[in-house]
Amino acid sequence: MSINRLAPTQRPLGWPVGYQRWHSLLFLHWPVEEAVLRPLVPPELTIDLYAGAAYVGLIPFVVEQARPAGWSARAGLTFLETNVRTYVHFEGRDPGVYFFSLDAASRLAVAGARFVFGLPYYHARGWMRRRNATIEYRLQRLTGQRGAVAVRYVVGDALGSARPGTLEHFLIERYVLHVKRRDRIWTTQVHHRPYPLYHARVLALHETLLRADGLPSPSAPPLAHFASVVDVDIFPPRCQPPASGAAAMA
């Protein structure tokens, strides 16, 4: 199946419903058997593969200026967030993200995202500090099945934006998210410039969020990348048509 992976990177028609700034994003990824993910992902969504492999991602980062359209950036929220995710598509289109969880250190952000987008957000607390090229990040989930992440890493040389067709592009350049609400798949698209990527080297990592989300704990070091900052436009969710029988059984 040939999937158009560049279409989601283009700006959608219409007006955003919200804005955010994302910075200090650490992308940690591990390959995982597709069969492990299949029971955890809605059957309407097909697991997206690269060279026959599925991937799970753990992404700690900082959200700034999070606000609905019409609000000034100064009125926006700032908080730490970590998400656990894999990659999916809907009947060969809209290659995007399926979130197992999103942990945010803001009660207001958690409540708003659950209500408006139906996303599995959880309230958390944490902190981040940076000393030269070394960043330390800690976050603890406070509700639901408890989990945490503590990571210390070094930011290396700039890589530029990921080239289409590469594993980095497959894992990182994702602009669409899918969520199942009641019996339908809803899709939300965001838009921002390509991620400015850097090499990253993990010095220490302890995490229990994957296990809390029903995923196996990693047994190998992650593939690590860092992105500095992007300004993000968030567009309204749209309801997908019912999946065909073939896609639903994939």
Image (tube, grey):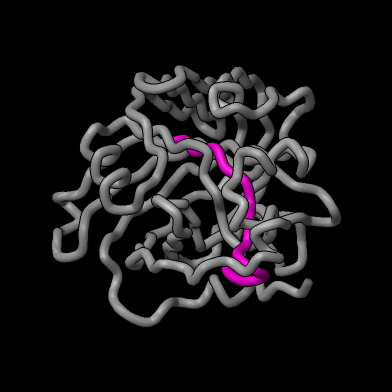
Quarter containing the N terminus: bottom right
Task: Give the magenta part as a residue range.
Answer: 82-94
Whether residue 222 appears in magenta in the rendering, the answer is no
Image point 32% across, 80% down: which residue?
Answer: 14
The part of the image, by quadrant, that contains residue 133 is top right
Looking at this rendering, what residue extends furthest in the front direction?
A: 245
Left or right? Give the position of 33 relative to 141.
right
Taking 113 as reference, is 38 left or right?
right
- Is 91 within the magenta? yes
Residue located farthest toward the right when viewing the structure as drawn: 51
Residue 167 on image: x %, y % = 75, 56
Q: What main secondary structure does the magenta stretch of the protein show? A: strand
Q: Percent x, y for residue 90? A: 60, 65
Q: Is residue 117 above or below residue 209?
A: below
Furthest toward the bottom, the residue is 13
Residue shown at 56%/24% (left/top)? 151
Snapshot quadrant of residue 169: bottom right
- The reply, left or right, for residue 139 in relation to residue 87 is left
Nearest the viewer among 44 and 76 is: 44
Which quadrant is the C terminus positioned in? bottom right
Q: Residue at x 43, y 60 (%)?
A: 186
- What residue is at 31 percent from the left and 46 percent from the top? 113
Q: Percent x, y for residue 122?
A: 37, 31
- Percent x, y of residue 5: 65, 71
Q: Nearer the viewer, residue 187 or 227?
A: 187
Q: Is residue 40 above or below residue 247?
A: above
Position above or below: 200 against 245? above
